[in-house]
């Protein structure tokens, strides 16, 4: 499993990040303080710096976790491919002014909940994503097409934002 984080930091903040990383490695700590990086689970990582305007730096941290066996027999990529198929159907129904079928919604929401159990694939977005998924379930029960479509659009925006950072 992989993880990826991107921060825009000042030179001072970048120095603090590197010192925190060094301290965590030297002392055998499991987490880099203030940055949410779990070292104990990583088997390799890479850091890339890009100079931005002024004293800002873009810091990209990517790493690979040891296999935990928690994924059962389904890989993250298989799960995401299935979600993509159902999401496409949901979006097509909305574009046609219809409420998506209960089957599409049920499978997509179950997969969405399962997706958020995989660490390192956009974890910061998971709580908001799950909230909007819950809201989708709630508005579907009302049968209000306009509200259903609004929540679908909100989910689509979250998906695009998350995928821009973590895909």
Image (cartoon, grey):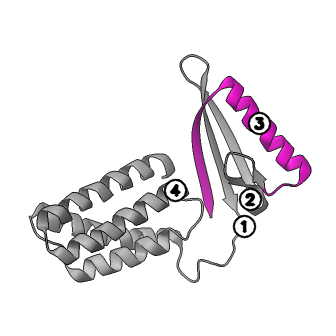
**Contact flag, marks 1 and 4 (Cβ < 8 Å):** no
Image location (x, y in percent) of residue 126: 48, 61
Report the disc number at residue 18: 3
C-alpha span from label 3 to label 4: 22 Å
Question: What residue occupies the far left of the structure in this picture?
Answer: 97
Membership of 21 in magenta stretch: yes
**Counting residues from the N terminus, which is met first, the one under dot 2 or under dot 3?**
3
Task: Report, in whole angstroms, how far the alpha carbon at label 1 lies from the one at label 4.
Answer: 18 Å
Q: Is residue 18 rendered to the left or right of residue 124? A: right
Mark nearest the camera among 1 and 3 is 3
| Distance from Cα at disc 2 to Cα at disc 1 | 6 Å
Q: Residues within 10 Å of mark 4 (few under 14, many from 20)?
A: some
Classify 10 Å Cα crowding around label 2: few (below 14), some (14-19), many (20 and above): some
Name which residue lies at 28% across and 76% down.
105
In this view, 117 is above or below 35: below
- Looking at marks 1 and 4 on the same chain, the residue that comes earlier in the sequence is marked by 1
Real-space CA distance between mark 2 and mark 3, rounded to the nearest whole angstrom: 17 Å
Q: In which image quadrant can residue 82 be found?
A: bottom left
Reading the image, the residue beneath label 1 is: 66
Given residues 103 and 140, the one toward you in this image is 140
Determine whether label 2 and label 4 are within 8 Å by CB: no
Tell me the SS state at disc 3: helix
Which residue is located at x 69 percent, y 45 percent?
Answer: 34
Q: CA distance from mark 1 to mark 3?
A: 23 Å
In the rendered image, residue 60, in percent from the top left (x then y), is placed at 61, 40
């Amino acid at each position: 499993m992989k993880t990826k984080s991107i921060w825009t930091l000042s030179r001072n903040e970048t120095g603090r990040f590197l010192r925190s990383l060094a301290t965590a490695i030297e002392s055998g700590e499991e987490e880099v303080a203030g940055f949410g990086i779990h070292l104990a689970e990583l088997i390799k990582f890479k850091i890339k710096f890009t100079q931005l305007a002024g004293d800002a730096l873009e810091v990209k941290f990517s790493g690979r976790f040891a296999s935990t066996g928690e994924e059962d027999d389904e890989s993250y990529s298989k799960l995401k491919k299935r979600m993509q198929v159902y999401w496409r159907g949901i979006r097509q129904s909305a574009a046609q002014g219809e409420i998506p079928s209960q089957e599409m919604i049920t499978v997509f929401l179950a997969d969405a909940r399962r997706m958020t159990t995989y660490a390192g694939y956009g974890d910061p977005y998971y709580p908001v994503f799950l909230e909007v998924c819950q809201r989708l379930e709630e508005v579907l029960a009302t049968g209000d097409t306009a509200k259903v479509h609004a929540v679908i659009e909100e989910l689509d925006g979250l998906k695009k934002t998350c995928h821009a950072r973590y895909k």
